[in-house]
Amino acid sequence: MKKILSDKYRHFVLCFEVFMLLLLIPLTYNLIPVNEGTKTFYMPSSNINDVVKTLKSNGYEVTWMDKLMLRIRRTPDEGWYSVEPGEQGRFLFFQHLYKQKTDEMMEVVVYAGETKDELTARLANDMKLEQTKLLETYNVFAHFEEADILAQRYTIARKANEEATMQYIFLESRRKLKTFSKEYFKRTPNLMQLKVVHIIASIIQKESNSVHEMPLISSVIYNRLEKGMRLQMDSTLNYGVYAHTIVTPERIKSDESEYNTYKHKGLPPHPLSTVTLEALKASIKPIQSDYLFFMLNKTGSHNFTATYDKHLENIRAFRKYQKERKKRKGKREANNTYNKSLVEKQPYKAQAVINSNSKKVSLKTSLVPLKEF
């Protein structure tokens, strides 16, 4: 009888010890502090390996137990997350991570034709971040001098820091570039092939924002390159600190860099600025044409020609239009100055003149001084 009771007691003690051990494991686990990492970050997918990689890259240590906790309830979805590790235990932090999505978002725009300096300066101002840190992260991820980021809208968490912001923008750009490459390249392009595409796209982008004209400008670039002609395009001189400066004849003569396609054959050494997906597509798929020239016209679009004589006609036509527009502008300014002087000297007469110009002259306004109205 004693032996039976002893066996039952030992069995009870063993079960109790196992129970306490099972209870202590999660309690002990929960007491292990979560190390402080980036509090706002972007989760690129709900794949458990991507989740773990993202957490580690943002400064969080992830053990096999943490990974188990991430699986037990629900793996976090793609999106922006804001967390406060110090306000909850390790158990809740990993098990409830999927609930920590942030709704404090803002839209930022990357404009076509921006340089990385202009882009980071504007982001720093809009998001209250440090431009130096934004540039540092940009340079870590960038493949080229410029154009690594696509010109488009990006939705970013308001509390994102410099690194998280740039990582996300690069992630979105690379995703679209990957889709673009699959669609337009038979084989995965190497970095040099992508660089050439981005250089051509940046020239197109600088020349026109018209989606309709982009393939036409692309055809001119390819046709001139195939014939061994210099590109002779002002846009190639809009690089770096000269990104938005007017290209003058003096500048063309003095600039000795390889960006000056009036002096050097071939493409510039690097992309000029950010580009749109449409410009990238045009750089791969130019329209089949014999065009070698294009010239701005009075509508703001371009005339494309295959011969230099016709190109000269277009140049003369546009210069004539510019002179006429300047003359009309001068007349308007002179008329405005005259009317202003009349108002200052003789209010009642000036009112009659002004109303006469707008075809609203009345007997009263042409005879009665303004002060009597």
Image: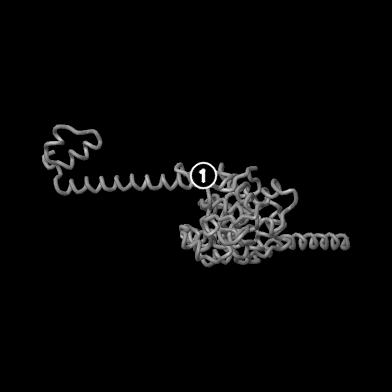
Q: Residue at x 69, y 63 (%)?
A: 62
Q: Quadrant of residue 142?
A: bottom right
Task: Tell me if I can see residue 44 in this picture.
Answer: no
What's the coloring here? one colour
The percent position of residue 46, horizontal first and vertical second, equals 68, 51
Q: Between 11 and 302, which is closer to the camera in this rendering?
A: 302
For this view, does 343 lie left or right of residue 192?
left
The residue shown at (25%, 45%) is 335
Residue 188 placed where, x, y %? 73, 53
Residue beneath label 1, please?
302
Quarter the C terminus occupies: top left
SS at mark 1?
strand
Q: Position of residue 215 (x, y in %)?
A: 60, 45
Q: Quadrant of the N terminus?
A: bottom right
Residue 2 vs residue 249, the one in the foreground: 249
Q: Position of residue 113 (x, y in %)?
A: 53, 54
343 relative to 276 in the view: left or right: left
Q: Nearer the viewer, residue 28 or 159?
A: 159
User: Three-letter amino acid code at disc 1?
Assistant: His
Camera-side residue: 7 or 266?
266
